[in-house]
Amino acid sequence: MLMHIEVTDTFGGEANYAWVRRKTVECLEQHIMSNRAAVRIAKKEMGWTGERCTTQALGDMIEVRLNCAHIVMFITFGE
């Protein structure tokens, strides 16, 4: 299974896409891995380890907002 990670800036609380960083990581199947484990992997891959974040599961997507900046990360799973 592939984990797709997308990081971008926000404007007015919404994703702005003035810039974007994308990364794809091979991982366990989504139903085997918890959301917390997925967020930890994504934060490590994007250099956010140790940063405080707010996480929200939105169905097939996980949204992670960095508390100290106007940046959002979207985590999705696919082939």
Image (spheres, rainbow, N blue to C red):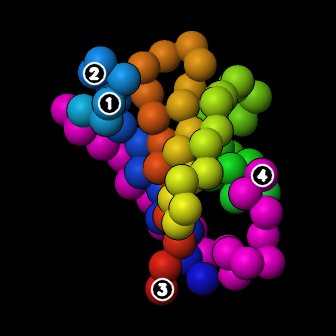
Asked if disc 1 and disc 3 are in contact, CB closer than 8 Å, the reply is no
Residue 9 sits in which quadrant?
top left
Circle 1 sits on which residue?
14
Asked if disc 4 and disc 1 are in contact, CB closer than 8 Å, the reply is no
What is the number of the mark on residue 79?
A: 3
Front-most of residues 52 and 35:
35
Residue 29 location (% of width, % of height): 70, 81
Q: State which mark lies toward you, 1 or 3.
A: 1
Query: What type is the residue that disc 3 sits on?
Result: Glu
What is the number of the mark on residue 11?
A: 2
What is the number of the mark on residue 36?
A: 4
3 or 2: tag closer to the N-terminus? 2
Query: What type is the residue that disc 1 sits on?
Result: Glu
4 or 1: tag closer to the N-terminus? 1
4 or 2: tag closer to the N-terminus? 2
Query: Which residue occupies 64% across, 39% down?
Result: 55
Asked if disc 1 and disc 2 are in contact, CB closer than 8 Å, the reply is yes
Q: Residues within 10 Å of mark 1 (few under 14, many from 20)?
A: few
Q: Is disc 3 placed on a helix, strand or loop? A: loop
Query: Which residue occupies 45% across, 35% down?
Result: 72
Residue 7 location (% of width, % of height): 42, 42
Gap in angstroms between the C-alphas marked 4 and 1: 23 Å
Q: Residues within 10 Å of mark 2 (few under 14, many from 20)?
A: few
Q: State which mark lies toward you, 4 or 1.
A: 1
Q: Is residue 15 among what the camera can see?
A: yes
- The reply to whether the magenta stretch includes residue 30 is yes
Gap in angstroms between the C-alphas marked 3 and 2: 31 Å
Q: Is disc 1 placed on a helix, strand or loop? A: strand
